[in-house]
Image (spheres, helix red, strand yellow):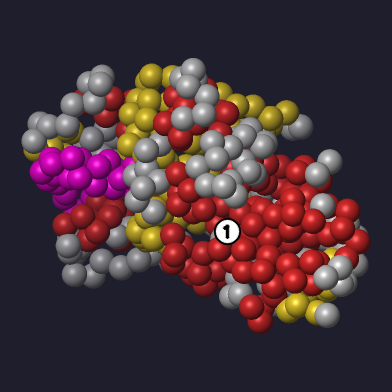
Amino acid sequence: MVIYVKKHISSCDTNTQGSALYKCIFAHLNASNPVTVDFNGTMNVTSSFVNSSFVELASHFGADKVKRLVKIKSANRQIANMIKDRMSKEFA
Amino acid sequence: MIIVLPKQFRAKDLFPFFRAQFGNPIQVPKEVIFDFSMMSFVRPSGIVFLSNLSRFLMLNGSRVIFQGMNINRECIRYLDDSGFIAAHTGQSLRKDSKVRATTMPLHRLPHNESHNWIGSELLPWLSNHSKLPLDELLEFKTCMSEVFNNIVDHSEIDTGSIFSQWYPQEKKLQIAIADFGVGIPTTVRSKEPDHSDAEAILRAFDDGFSAQSTPQNRGAGLFYLKQNVLDNLGGKLTVRSQNGAVDFTKSGNSLSSVPYEGIGFCPGTMIEIEIRTDRFVFENNNVEDFQW
């Protein structure tokens, strides 16, 4: 399953938008199914967005499960760095 | 009360100046007349600082009047073109007043419009002047969004005022953003009550510190702003809130945070960001293959 971020939210700036992505991914992880999150067309992500999406998912399912089942695609430098930084600091 | 504004119209000078005028604790007069006749030098921080202070005074019942605006003086024409005068009096001083190419005029932005404005207005404008492609400005864009997310997290009024000036010869951008919130010190002291104003500002920029004003707040946004402005964007940062201020700078590999206590007054919070687009430094440019 591929989730195209741009299809669901206009940008990745706020907690609300992060929560929207969280809901898109939640059911897949709940069923232990792999999911690809494609950031094609997204310029950047804020810490609030990542906190409300990936960090929240990792808080619920565990960071190992998120890293095992969620594949990130088409992430530019800023997006990749922000996701990795937030996850590593919260789940070191 | 008549306040003759100082020659240097920038937050660095206005911050202590108003403390001396209004006293400690701050006394809001029934009427304040700002006299611009001595002013000769305008910086973005001065425009946003006085704009924010004027609105603070009006919200607290004061009548605010501007005088001494001689349009034959370049600094007054600049102020007119910045949008400051129209924003506060309803109209520009001159019929031919217009926004200068190297400025983004004074703008009041509600949070729900801020991210779109940053992406559709500020970023293309900076890209055009700096000649940098948009994908070299992503960290800057994120920094600006972090500022506005911080405003909505910590302010009962979710609107920020912003003004930007591009200096082409130095490839330098100065941005000043101010809000009317309770101020960073009040927010920080809700969790750690013993901090002075300047100490609280320093604490707010620590990695992982959060007053948990929202459940998702994890203390990453202001640290990201500081880290990127200093490490990646070749810049510096000054934060003023209530009676405290902190200058964040980097010299060589050494980061410096200089707090100032009890020397001025700033309603809400004001952040001054300066970046140098010829000093951007990034690592890890190609990350197509994301690995956790």
Query: Based on the displayed image, in which of its 4 quarters is residue B53 positioned?
Result: top left
- Name the quarter where the N terminus of chain B is drawn: top left
Horizontal and vertical percent for residue B118?
Answer: 51, 64
**Residue lying at the far front of the rendered structure:** A31
Q: Which residue is mark 1?
A: A15
**Looking at the image, is B96 positioned above or below residue B158?**
below
The magenta-colored residue range is B45-73
**Looking at the image, is B77 positioned above or below residue B65?**
below
Left or right: where B5 falls relative to A57 = left
**Looking at the image, is B113 positioned above or below residue B15?**
below
Task: Name the one closer to the observer, A65 or B30.
Answer: A65
Horizontal and vertical percent for residue B175?
Answer: 48, 50
B47 is within the stretch colored magenta? yes
B61 is within the stretch colored magenta? yes
Horizontal and vertical percent for residue B24?
Answer: 26, 19
Element carrying mark 1: helix
